[in-house]
Image (cartoon, rainbow, N blue to C red):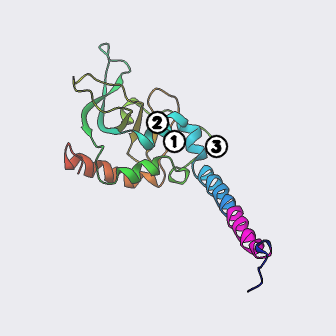
Amino acid sequence: MQPTRNNADHGQPGSLIVVGILAMAAGLAAFAVWFQWTQTRRCLGFFGPGIATAIQTAPRVEAWRLSPKSTPDGSGGRVVATSREDVSQARGLVHLRHGLVEDSNYAWSDRPAGRRPIGAWDVALAFYDTTPSPSGAASQPAAVLAFDLEGDGAVTVVGRPGSVVLGRLGPGLRDWMAATFEAGPTGR
């Protein structure tokens, strides 16, 4: 007959390894949350959490070509969409969504950007929380971002003051918009 061993003596090293792995996992998870926050904090401040969420998760996205429309008296005006295309399935949209909420893609400045002329806004992306209704009734987008793609470029949230210079996002966004409009309604 063999002598019985005390299992409590042998369970200790394994328990320490498990606790060490769990502590390391918790530390890495905390680092990941902190790192993501540092990558997006300025965008969250500019867009707000609701619009940033719509940019990332909206099931339907439309690209609009914009042009100025003057008022009947010839003063001022507003920007209207002259064409709209559903780009929800467009190539590269997933990467664009991520890039739109990443701080390093913009040229942030401590001083507010000056007001751009009404005709400066070339294109817009509209993010919808829902897919179109079967009746064809128009739904309101959760967020509309207008872009000035000329020169240094800029983005603004329609209906809110302020804009941010596009920075390194500008050239890629110009190319993506041109390719997407050229590809037609499916955006493929």
Q: Secondary structure at mark 1?
A: strand
List the residue tagged with mark 1: 164
The type of residue carrying mark 2 is Thr
List the residue tagged with mark 3: 110
Residue at 38%, 55% (x, y): give it.
172
In whole angstroms, how far apart are the C-alphas of marks 2 and 3?
16 Å
> Does the residue at mark 1 contact the one at mark 2 (Cβ under 8 Å)?
yes
Magenta stretch: dominant SS?
helix
| Along the line of sight, the residue nearer the viewer: 108 or 1 | 1
Q: Residues within 10 Å of mark 1 (few under 14, many from 20)?
A: many
The reply to whether the magenta stretch includes residue 19 is yes
> Does the residue at mark 2 contact the one at mark 3 (Cβ under 8 Å)?
no
Q: Secondary structure at mark 2?
A: strand
The segment highlighted magenta reads 9-24
187 left or right of 42 in image: left
The type of residue carrying mark 1 is Val
Above or below 133: residue 147 = below
In whole angstroms, how far apart are the C-alphas of marks 1 and 2?
7 Å
Residue 113 visible? The answer is no
Residue at 36%, 24% (x, y): give it.
78
Residue 130 appears at what percent x and percent y? 35, 32
User: Disc 2 or 3, which lies upstream in sequence?
Assistant: 3
Residue 67 visible? The answer is yes
Residue at 57%, 41% (x, y): give it.
44
> Does the residue at mark 3 contact the one at mark 1 (Cβ under 8 Å)?
no
Residue 135 appears at what percent x and percent y? 21, 22
List the residue tagged with mark 2: 156
